[in-house]
Amino acid sequence: MRSEFESIVEALSLDESSPTTYLDDLDRLDRAERFIAPIPPRQSFLSTLIMAKKAFARWFNRRQQEDDGAHI
């Protein structure tokens, strides 16, 4: 019986692995589906100041009724 088992084990090739593993495939999928944030275009200092002025004016001139809609 032992000799039969050893003959079966000797016939097996233990190097039948693929070049990639299941974990490598999962890692590749994760990299493919990863979010890449867009790079916004650079703005000049003057345009940044103008936008900040407009945002401040909108905030300062807001109505007091503006809220998130939650009521108690």
Image: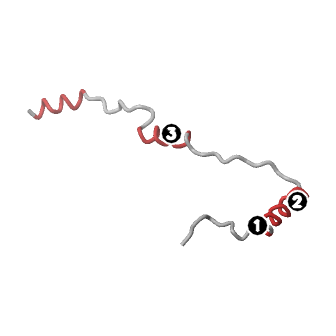
Q: Where 6 sits versus 38, above or below? A: above
> Considering only order in the chain, which callout, 2 or 1, is on the residue closer to the N terminus?
2
**Front label number (3 vs 1):** 1
> Considering only order in the chain, which callout, 1 or 3, is on the residue closer to the N terminus?
3
The image shows a total of numbered marks equal to: 3
- Residue 53: image quadrant is bottom right
**Front label number (1 vs 2):** 1
Which residue appears at 17% of the width and 32% of the height?
6
Q: Nearer the viewer, residue 67 or 19?
A: 67
Q: Mark 1 highlights which residue?
A: 62
Q: Nearer the viewer, residue 55 or 42?
A: 55
Residue 18 relative to residue 2: left or right: right
Which residue appears at 65% of the width and 67% of the height?
67
Q: Amino acid at mark 3?
A: Leu
Q: Mark 2 highlights which residue?
A: 50
Q: Where 24 sits versus 40, above or below? A: above
- Residue 61: image quadrant is bottom right
Q: Amino acid at mark 1?
A: Arg
Which residue appears at 76% of the width and 49% of the height?
40
Q: Where 44 sits versus 22, above or below? A: below
Residue 9: x, y in percent? 21, 32
SS of the residue at dot 2?
Answer: helix
What's the CA distance linking mark 1 and mark 2?
18 Å
Residue 56: x, y in percent? 81, 66
**Front label number (3 vs 2):** 2
Q: Quadrant of the C terminus?
A: bottom right
Alpha-carbon neighbours of circle 3 within 10 Å: few (<14), some, or many (≥20)?
few
Residue 32: x, y in percent? 56, 39
Residue 37 relative to residue 72: left or right: right
Q: Amino acid at mark 2?
A: Ile
What's the CA distance linking mark 3 and mark 2?
43 Å
Q: Mark 3 highlights which residue?
A: 29
